[in-house]
Image: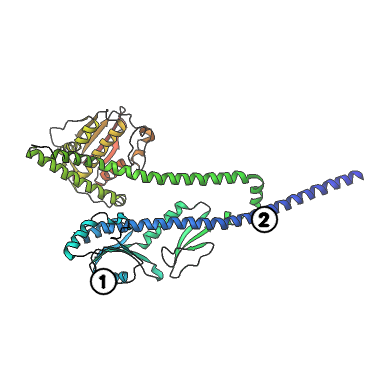
Amino acid sequence: MNSNRRATLIWILLVGSALALSLLAVALIHKQNLRQRSAAEALLASESERLNSHLEAYFQEIRNETARQLISFHQEGLANQLRRWQASNALISKAAVISSDHPTATAALANPTESISLEDPDTPSVFRGGYYQENREIELYEHGQVEPILLWFRSGLGERGLTWTAFHRIVPEGALRYARLDRETLLASFSELLAELSGPSIFANIQSGPHPAAETQNSRPLDWLGSGYSLDLTLNSKTANGDWLGNFGYLMVAVCLSLCGVSATLLARQTIRERREALRKTSFVSQISHEFKTPLTSITLYADLLGEQDLPDSKRIRYLDTISRESQRLTELVDNLLGLSALEQGKRSYHIETLDLRTTISNTLIDYQPTLSQSGMDVSWDPPKEPVAAQADRNVVRQTLINLLDNARKYAGSESPVQIDLQSNGSASFIRVTDRGPGIPVEHSQRIFESFYQERSLLEDKSPGFGLGLSISRRMLRDCQGDLYLDSSYEEGARFVMQFSTAP
């Protein structure tokens, strides 16, 4: 009897303990859910503020850059410049010149969303760059007075949404140049930015409609963008609602590991994102230096040589010709930077003609000689006796050759000799650029042609490029029915081969 009573008591204790543990688990789960709900509300509030701040700053950057470019164009040939700008910039839906009595101009002048006087000393100087000062002097000379202004006009409601348009004029009652932002492209860029900034627990998107959005926990009106636009945030289902069965195991077994894992992942993603953004900014400056260094060096050198006394006329003419060619090359490089998206979309235009590659290589080396002399790099070039014809774009050949020489100088070192060879087999012509540097490991032989890719072991104690030179060169040559590749059979350094078709 006592044994049965003891067994019953043990079972009661076990069942009671199980029930107590179950109730405790339920209580903890309920408390956890309350904490999750409170944390979700706090997260939505903080994320809404943070994302809204980033979006507003990004939109202001777009407006400032659009206004800066609009103001910087020269008066001469303005309509054509605006058309080319519109064609090359996806953010611009329309850019043109209109009279002050045009209905669009009348509406903007009567009720501008924002008006900036460019004569105001507090106005950022970036708006007075480009050809602004020259345009101002021309208008002042012709009209006797100027009142340069920049206007932003927000127009349109209903299903089409709002549009933003920048206007600029220098003379009162004079013609206005304007640029209208493309609404769909702008919203798409906002969506891409939100995808980068928002964490895995939040879905963020921008809603638009004809009526203003009311501010709620999940929705925040974007007053800086315009009436009817709102930033909507939604927590994913696992964050917003706890799974009771899943919560039990989550609560009892893996809460710390899960939180640590999620936190580490979020921290890693944020760190990678910040490093990528910082790298883009610094690399952009590096790329500009990389692209502009050679022509600027040549222009500076020959400009200094022009100042020498008793300089023969023949040399003076040759120096001026070189400065003119390098200045034109700078213009072409600027066009290439602005038209990078056109290159990626296969819309870049080329002038393909029959070239004698001997002459093209020799002229390129002559113009590049100041840089070679300054760096101390020895380039060996023995032109063939017979012409070597190829169907190619002269500027593409020139830019690719200079890029390969720059890479050899940076990665192989100025003490490494460089050999340029030119061959033809009848159906194709080949320019080979060979150095005796450390070479390129096999595992990187193809990836070096990817955009933004750089082999780290080659960057130690060097001045790295932007990781775009080989990629852009290969794509341009392939657009011209040619190619650029690394000769993997060469093991004493690096050998790049430019291939061209000889038949039109």
| Residue depicted at 7% across the width and 40% down the height | 313
- Mark 1 burial class by Cα count in 10 Å: few <14, some 14-19, many 20+: few
Q: Which residue is more in the foreground, 101 or 197?
A: 101
Q: Residue at (23%, 64%) from the top-left corner?
A: 146
Outermost residue, right side: 1
Q: Which mark is residue 115?
A: none
Q: Earlier in the sequence, mark 2 or mark 1?
A: 2
The x, y position of residue 361, in whole percent, is: 18, 37
Residue 338, percent across and down?
28, 51
Residue 436 position within the rendered picture, expressed as x and y whole percent measured from the top left: 28, 28
The secondary structure type at the circle numbered 1 is loop
Q: Amino acid at mark 1?
A: His
Pick the quarter of the image with the N terminus.
Answer: top right
Q: How is the image coloured?
A: rainbow
Tag 2: Cα neighbours inside 10 Å, few (<14), some, or many (≥20)?
A: some
Please give left or right for residue 22 compared with residue 234 in the image. right
Look at the picture and state if 181 lies above or below 413.
below
Looking at the picture, how far across and down is residue 172, in whole percent?
Answer: 24, 68
Up/down of 330 relative to 127, above or below: above
Label 2 SS:
helix
The part of the image, by quadrant, that contains residue 178 is bottom left
Kindly identify which residue carries mark 1: 102
Taking the spot 64% from the left edge, 53% from the top edge, the residue there is 32
Work out how far the residue at label 2 is from the one at label 1, CA to CA, in angstroms.
Answer: 65 Å
Q: What's the amino acid at mark 2?
A: His
Indicate which disc residue 30 carries. 2
Location of residue 184 (image quadrant) = bottom left
Identify whether 135 is placed above or below 371.
below
Residue 303 occupies quadrant: top left
